[in-house]
Amino acid sequence: MAILPLVILPDSRLRLVSEPVGSVTSEIRKLADDMLETMYDAPGVGLAAIQIGVLKRLVTIDTSKEENVRRPQVFIDPVISWESEETRSYDEGCLSIPDYYAEVIRPDRVRVRFRDLDGKEQEIEADGLLATCIQHEIDHLNGTLFIDHISKLKRDRVMKKFTKAAKRDAA
């Protein structure tokens, strides 16, 4: 397993729409392992493949809140098949937008279809943090960032801050 570099805003790759995985190969399983290691190292609760520069519809999540307990989940080609009308506000952050958090309102519950690491079709219903995380990561696969769910004024401020930082780091 390897810890991979994260793609950080304003990198335009974060706006790309990811491609279906196709067959679940040993390379895909290794990618999922590397993504989990990268996510845990960051530390974070979710990671989409595009966040490490891979344009595949692959997501890793672990919302376990217990100290030293890991419950990794891998979602291959995930699709939200249902979402509740009830919403929930959550203070979201993102490994690709470090140290920035904002309240985002999303459906409270979702049902998601995906394939697991064995290539088997699965479907789960999620609520709370897991539902929020699934929606956040699937957004990444579609080129959407959590800042797209906040006001234009706040989004513009974040973009300006990260664009300025990227220019400073490149100099």
Image (tube, helix red, strand yellow):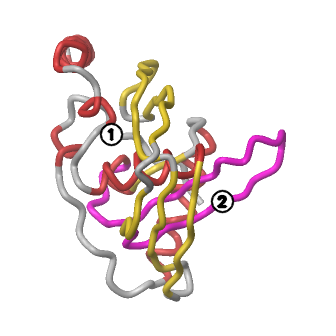
Badge 1 local density, few (<14 within 10 Å), some, or many (20+)?
A: some
The residue located at (38%, 57%) in the rendering is: 49
Task: Between residue 67 and residue 126, name the one nearer to us.
Answer: 126
Residue 113's place in the image compared with 148, above or below, is below
**Residue range (magenta):** 52-78
Task: Between residue 110 and residue 6, name the one nearer to us.
Answer: 110
Residue 66's place in the image compared with 58, above or below, is above
Query: Which secondary structure, mark 2?
Result: loop
- State the CA–CA distance, disc 2 to disc 1: 21 Å
The residue located at (50%, 46%) in the rendering is: 108
The residue located at (46%, 45%) in the rendering is: 86
Using residue 171 as the reference point, say whether residue 105 is left or right of it. right
Q: Which residue is mark 2?
A: 72
Query: Is residue 63 part of the magenta span, yes or no?
Result: yes
Amino acid type, callout 1: Val
Query: Which secondary structure, mark 1?
Result: loop
> In the rendering, at what x and y percent does residue 92 appear?
47, 30
> In the rendering, at what x and y percent does residue 104 appear?
40, 30
Q: Which residue is mark 1?
A: 7
Task: Between residue 26 and residue 94, name the one nearer to us.
Answer: 94
Using residue 19 as the reference point, say whether residue 61 is left or right of it. right
Query: Farthest residue toward the front?
Result: 85
> Where does the N terminus fall, quadrant-wise?
bottom right
Badge 2 local density, few (<14 within 10 Å), some, or many (20+)?
A: some
> Where does the C terminus fall, quadrant-wise?
top left
Residue 107's place in the image compared with 93, above or below, is below
Amino acid type, callout 2: Pro
